[in-house]
Image (cartoon, grey):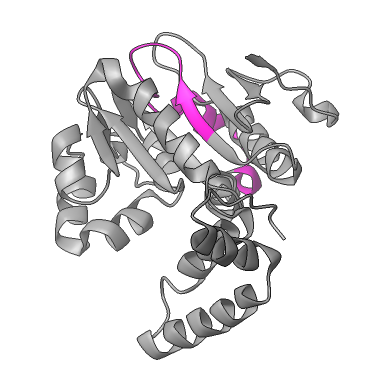
């Protein structure tokens, strides 16, 4: 059963175009874009989204965060007029705000259907998992405005699909259909539109079955070694493996394996 999440930060007293609900039984928080019909993300919302991710990351009741939207479209992108009204200092923080899901220690799932353009695509790329319905279309259309992606979109995309495909997408403002996104490794899973919520629910339950400590460690290790030399990545992997060997969760996992029972992880 979900309930509206209550924030103590006064800056989050009136959320701009989105809401946050929590399901205590599922240890799950949902950030829900809700500005129909296209869920345009305002400049103010970008600041608030960062603060929301930071607050949810600190809440020990929550294991998994889901970023989703009401309606047929995830988001058509940002408020175009808002770019002209924002100060250079504010614009310089766009990428930092939209990278909040990546900095979050907890697993973050993006549920994408319909349009996921511009910042809608960029914030999805900053999530750990992207579950897409067959209606989903990704795009970075900034070239049509005489601009380039400004919130990490082209950089993150190039890491996933390479420079050739990224040039094709960015320089031509090309739309990527859901099945292509899956084939190219952008999407984690592609399902029928009617199955999107079920697929997300299933992934949330799966992730909750693992050790919170091991999940946090794996996410940070993979993020930190994305640009590292292979030798450096292997060294860091070994150091983190050694650290987890001392954890209560690893001890519990080993004992549960031998006892043929489900482990009861505590995150310690």
Segment tinted magenta in the rendering: 66-90
Viewer can see residue 219? no
The picture quadrant where one finds residue 156 is bottom left
In this orientation, which residue lies closer to the viewer: 148 or 261?
Answer: 261
Residue found at x 63% / y 23%: 23
Which quadrant, please, contains the N terminus? Answer: top right
Residue depicted at 53% across the width and 28% down the height? 82
Which residue: 48% across, 65% down?
223
Q: Position of residue 66 (x, y in %)?
A: 51, 33
Q: Determine the image quadrant of residue 231.
A: bottom left
User: Vertically, is 250 above or below 266?
Assistant: below
Residue 268 appears left or right of 26: right
Query: Residue 21 location, x and y as percent?
Result: 64, 21
Question: The C terminus lies in which quarter of the figure?
Answer: bottom right
Residue at the extreme front of the image, as rendered: 259
Q: Taking the image as drawn, is residue 252 in sight?
A: yes
In front of the other: 125 or 260: 260
Say which quarter of the image contains residue 59. Answer: top right
Q: Position of residue 64 (x, y in %)?
A: 57, 39
Numbered circles on residues, count: 0
| Front in this rendered view, residue 83 or 166 | 166
Above-or-below relation of 218 to 10: below
Residue 250 % position (x, y): 60, 67
Q: Is residue 67 magenta?
A: yes
**Nearer to us in this view, 135 or 259:** 259
Residue 184 located within the stretch drawn in magenta: no
Residue drawn at point x = 29 percent, y = 31 percent = 132
């Amino acid at each position: 059963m979900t309930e509206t999440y209550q924030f103590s930060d006064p800056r989050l007293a009136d959320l701009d175009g989105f809401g946050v609900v929590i399901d205590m039984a599922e240890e799950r928080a949902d950030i829900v874009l809700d500005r129909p019909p296209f869920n345009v993300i305002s400049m103010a919302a970008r600041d608030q989204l960062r603060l929301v991710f930071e607050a949810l990351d600190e809440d020990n009741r929550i294991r998994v965060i889901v970023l989703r939207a009401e309606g047929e479209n995830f988001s058509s992108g940002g408020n175009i007029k808002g770019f002209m009204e924002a100060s250079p200092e504010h614009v310089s923080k766009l990428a930092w705000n939209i990278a909040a899901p990546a900095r979050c220690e907890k697993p973050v799932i993006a549920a994408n259907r319909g349009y996921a353009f511009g910042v809608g695509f960029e914030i999805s790329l900053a999530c750990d998992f992207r579950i897409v319905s067959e209606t989903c279309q990704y795009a970075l259309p900034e070239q049509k405005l005489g601009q380039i992606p400004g919130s990490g979109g082209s950089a993150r995309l190039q890491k996933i699909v390479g420079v050739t495909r990224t040039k094709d997408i960015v320089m031509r403002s090309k739309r990527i259909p859901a099945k292509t996104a899956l084939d190219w490794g952008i999407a984690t899973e592609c399902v029928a539109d009617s199955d999107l919520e079920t697929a997300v629910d299933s992934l949330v339950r799966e992730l909750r079955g693992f050790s919170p400590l091991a999940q946090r460690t794996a996410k940070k290790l993979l993020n930190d070694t994305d640009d590292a030399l292979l030798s450096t990545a292997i060294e860091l992997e070994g150091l983190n493996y050694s650290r987890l060997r001392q954890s209560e969760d690893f001890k519990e996992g080993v004992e549960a394996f031998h006892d043929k029972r489900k482990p009861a992880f505590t995150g310690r």
